[in-house]
Every structure is written in C-alpha cells, then in structure tokens.
Image (cartoon, rainbow, N blue to C red):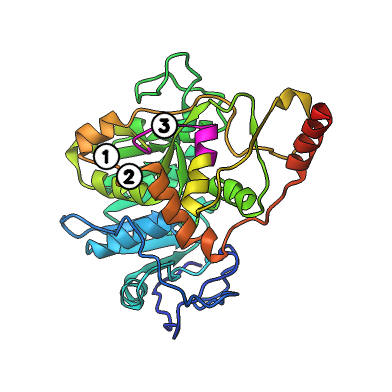
Amino acid sequence: MASLMVVQHRQPSSTVLSSTLSDFNGARVTFSVQLRRKVWQPRGALRVSASSAKKILIMGGTRFIGIFLSRLLVKEGHQVTLFTRGKAPIAQQLPGESEADFSDFSSKILHFKGDRQDFDFVKTSLAAEGFDVVYDINGREAVEVEPILDALPNLEQYIYCSSAGVYLKTDYPPHYEVDAVDPKSRHRGKLETESLLASRDVNWTSIRPVYIYGPLNYNPVEEWFFHRLKAGRPIPVPNSGIQITQLGHVKDLATAFIKVLGNPNASKEVFNISGDKYVTFDGLARACAKAGGFPEPEIVHYSPKEFDFGKKKPFPFRDQHFFASIDKAKSLLGWTPEFDLVEGLTDSYNLDFGRGTFRKEADFSTDDIILGKSLVLQS
C-alpha cells in the first residue's frame, strides 16, 4: 500500500554531504571532509514566477532534475507530492543550500509511496487523491503513463520529460522540434508516450533535453572529464575531437519546466531545452579544465574502430554531431538559459565533484588501452 505523508527531517547541526550522493540512507548524511572553506554560492538561484497554486504530482523527483524542480515548485507555493518507491530520502540538503531553505522545503514536500509499474494501484490511488498537474520525470514507456491519465480525467496539464535522443540523424543540424524522429531509437518509449499524450484528450507538454549536466548528475557527463583532470591524466577523445554537441544545465532545465506550467503557449507542444551554444568534444575537455581550475589538458585522439572495449563505454557522448535548436522555447516561453558552459561547469564542480562527491568511481581501464597503443605507435 502507498501512503501520503508530510516528510519532516531533523536539521543537521553542520553542513554535511555523502561521499557519493547515490548512497543516501537517511535524512542526515556524513561527508569525509568537513566543509570549512569558503562556501561556494551557487549560481542559478531558484527564482520563481507567480501563478495560482496547484496540487502537483511529480513522478520521481528524488534525483537530479526532480530535486531542483521540486524546490522551484514549492517556492512558488504549489502543493507538491513525489511519487516514488521510497528507496531514497524524499528530502536531502543540497550543496550550498541554507538551513532555512532546506527546512522550509522538507516541511512542505509530500510523498506518495508506490510502484508505478503496479498499474491498478496507480489508477485507484491517484484517482482517490486527485491532482491538477503531473510532472513525469522518470517515465520511459507509454504503458506507464496510460493509467495516470485514466486516473485523473480532470487533469489540467501533463508535463513530460522526453529526450532529444528521439530525433533521426540528420545532415542538416541542429535538430528542430518538427524534425523527423527515429522509431528505432533507444528512446522510442518516450516517442510512444508523446504519441499517447497527443491521442488523448489532455493538455500536455513535452520537454526534450539534450545532454544535461550540473550538481548531482547521475550520468557521467562532466564527472568523466573531472576524474581524469584530477588524476592528471590525458583525456582520450574519439576521432578528430571536433564533433559538435550541446549541454544544458539542470537548473536551466528546471526553470524551463516551470515556464511551461499553465502556459497556453506550451499546450500540446514539444520544446528542445539545452544550452545556448554548442561545443566540440575537445572544447568540452578544455571547458571542464577551466571550470575546475586545472591546467590545459592533454587530449589524445583515437579511432574507436581500432579497439575492442567489450561492453565498456570509453567516452560519455555519442560519437557524432548532436545538438538542437532552443529557439522555440526562447520565443514561446520567454525562457533563456542562465548558464554559459564554463559557468555551468564551474557551478557543477564547486557544488559537487570539487567537494569530493561523485556518482561513480574513476575507471581508467579503457583509457589505458587507448593510451597504451598510442605510446606504442609513438615509439
């Protein structure tokens, strides 16, 4: 059975963090090094705009995007409930977050415990509660969304986190929202969800981020570079290194999610969300070095076809040009990213990796294979 409850936490007497933020086991966590140095003031303060208070359900919400989004919604005065399996704490103090802000958030956030794969339970329990708006942050398949729609016939808006990975490869980048999509994409479940939403009598909005980065990122995006920079190692980059990609800061993404709430310009629309500028792989390595205060990195280019890495992934990005236009969101939503890339990476480093926290331990095994062959070729 699920339960709806107000989650209240005892406030720690000092600011402490977990050594790996995927290891939270309670409201108060420990950190291997006490934070006695000057506190980094996070950029992208959680500013909100006025709107009528809504009863909002977030599917997910205890990781990355949901953590920042839920705070924005609470600050705006909405009643926010997180639907999770209850395996992670509902409220955790963020890096750089004041005691007062955390206390306010943790006293207001609500929790609905359950498994979204239990469709009958989802229908009956959500129908009993009733919600005005659903933010679906962790939905992957259309079959997971249908029972939510069935349970909430009077829903005002369904806001879905999709992915720019749904687009078909193109010779004419950047990707626009009207571009062809790839039905064989590994994100095809998100495509099918968008189709389901379009077929139902519901006001929906879909957000398609490109690569997301920022504090608490559970994907090894910037963290992959920071590990190598901290170790003083060369950075292996596939092929020429001039492949163009795009990153968007998680706080800018959270702001975009707020911008679509109750916005008539967002009704039954899809929006690409990411950073304002594009970057090459080599440029990203240098930007990460600058953000963390490291020397100019040594970049080693290699041909992936010359290696057998097994199931291991030697580089955290798809080896191709991959970027999208955000003009539609800027025009229709009045949304503009606050962070440029180096500022955003600095925010991520100072509030996360630079404090000794990360999601995955460094693994240089594929690097050693690449660098070992490079040394043989040079000798």
**C-beta proximity under 8 Å, tags 1 and 2:** yes
SS type, badge 3: loop
**C-beta proximity under 8 Å, tags 1 and 3:** no
Characterize the local packing of mark 1: few (<14), some (14-19) or many (20 or more) Cα atoms within 10 angstroms.
some
SS type, badge 2: strand
Q: Residue at x 52, y 23 (%)?
A: 183
**Left or right for 352, reference 41:** right
Q: Residue at x 54, y 33 (%)?
A: 281
The answer to which of marks 2 and 3 sits earlier in the sequence is: 2
Residue 154 in percent (x, y) is at 26, 48
Give yes or no for residue 124 being in the magenta stretch: no
Q: Determine whether 194 is above or below 30 in the image.
A: above
Q: Closest to the observer: 348 or 109?
A: 348
Residue 185 in percent (x, y) is at 55, 27
Tag 2 residue: 158
Tag 1 residue: 203
